[in-house]
Image (cartoon, coloured by chain):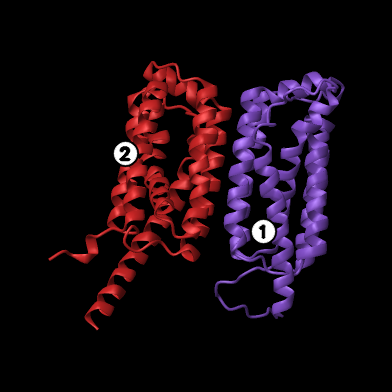
Amino acid sequence: MTAHIAPTRRHLDAPEWVHLVLVISTLATLWCAGYIYLGDAIAAPVIVAGALALVGWRAVTYGTVPSPTLFPVYILALVALQVNVLEKWMGGYAAMLLSVIPDAFVASSIVFDGSIFVAIFGPGAAALFLWASLGLFLGHPLGAYMAWALFVWSIFEGLMPVALSLASNELLYVPGMATGVLPLAAGVYGIARLFRDSRQFHAAR
Amino acid sequence: MTNPSIVYDRRTLLSAGLALVLTAAFAVVFVQQAGVMPTVIIASAMLGGLVCWLLTTARYPAHPERVIPVYAITTALLMVHILEEYVWDFGPRIGALTGTGWSQSEFVVLFGFVVPAFWILAGALVYVRHPLGNWIIWFIWCGMILGEPVHLLVFPFLEGGRYHYFPGMWTALFPLVAGLWGMTLLITDYRRDRDDAGQRAVA
């Protein structure tokens, strides 16, 4: 005997832990793909930022509903990030990475140059984070994770030109230095807002 | 007697002026890089958006809670579309068609970063109900209707030969769907706000 299921529109809402496992699975897959095709120099910062965002999300905002007031902060951080990526691309950041740390790109499977860099961190990243902004505005748990990811990654993007300059032993100008303060400030402010919103959420319950 | 329904506040008029300046600046740069045909399409979307905005949400700003989700879907799909255009050399192919020699790097600067910066920023501006954000979302959604079908209906024919792939083709119509959805929302909400304001005035 079959159960009667009424013909009506249904909504699927995964339990909270599924989102956590999904984020871990995605980061693990990205780690493998990034290691194979882009090398550690590109993959490691992305994975470390993603993992730190996971820690922040789990420790601070997990189980809370992100405030819609975070949306404009998120959007401004994304614009700041894109301005910084534009400076990096125009200044030849990818070529500088290849020259300062050539050993990180020697594997035959690695394909990395300025055109790959701009595709991933320009329109590619913008598409991903804009899609995630929908989740943030709608109060979806993954939207909160992606807000952490954007803000942590903004801090990384702001600091990496300085780190690369130090690694070169010559204190060179590295593309991204001039506008690095924009994503850095947006990222720090965004994380402060995530902490504040989490406190307010718990205080209101 | 002045009809109050067509009086705009100072911030709206300044935003309209800025919209005209941005349209003119964009057209001057773009016509030199990409030629007349693409410039007409995008400048028409900017001016069409300006007219639609002045007739609707300039008077009753869009409701962020209704508009922002569709805006986020549209802009995300639009960036995927731009990624497809970039990977398969949309800029140089258009440059070859129009004879301007539009380069890949010029395409990346303008449509990978500069114009998207305004599109992305519009989300925050709509959230705070700023007039400029209301114009930009009209521009984006008018652009979807004017610009995206061209990838399937015009560009492949301009290159001659058998109907073939043109960069951006596979992802062109999806932001169009979101654009139609967004415009419908804006018009529906505007009409309701206008009728509500009319009823309050009568009462």
| Quadrant assignment for the C terminus of chain A | bottom right
Q: Nearer the viewer, residue A159 or A137?
A: A159
**Residues tagged by mark 1 and mark 2 found on one chain of the structure:** no
| Spatial separation of the CA atoms under disc 1 and disc 2 | 35 Å
**SS for tag 1?**
helix
The chain holding disc 2 is B
**Label 1: how many Cα within 10 Å (few below 14, some 14–19, many 20+):** many
Above or below B186: residue B90: above
Across and down, in percent, residue A184 comes to 70, 44
Q: Which mark is residue A98?
A: none
**Label 2: how many Cα within 10 Å (few below 14, some 14–19, many 20+):** some
Q: Which mark is residue A143?
A: 1
Across and down, in percent, residue B121 comes to 51, 48
Say which residue appears at 53% left-offset and 29% top-offset.
B109
Say which residue appears at 31% left-offset and 61% top-offset.
B59
User: Amino acid type of disc 1?
Assistant: Gly
Chain B in the picture: what colour? red
Q: Nearer the viewer, residue B2 or A120?
A: B2
Is B181 positioned to the left or the right of B116 in the image?
left
Q: What is the residue that sits farthest to the bottom in this orientation?
A: B203
Q: Which mark is residue B44?
A: 2
Above or below B6: residue A11: below
Q: Nearer the viewer, residue B73 or A180?
A: A180
User: Amino acid type of disc 2?
Assistant: Ser
**SS for tag 2?**
helix
Say which residue appears at 72% left-offset and 26% top-offset.
A174
Across and down, in percent, residue A32 comes to 83, 39
The chain holding disc 1 is A
Say which residue appears at 82% left-offset and 50% top-offset.
A51
Residue A147 shows up from this direction: no
Chain A in the picture: what colour? purple
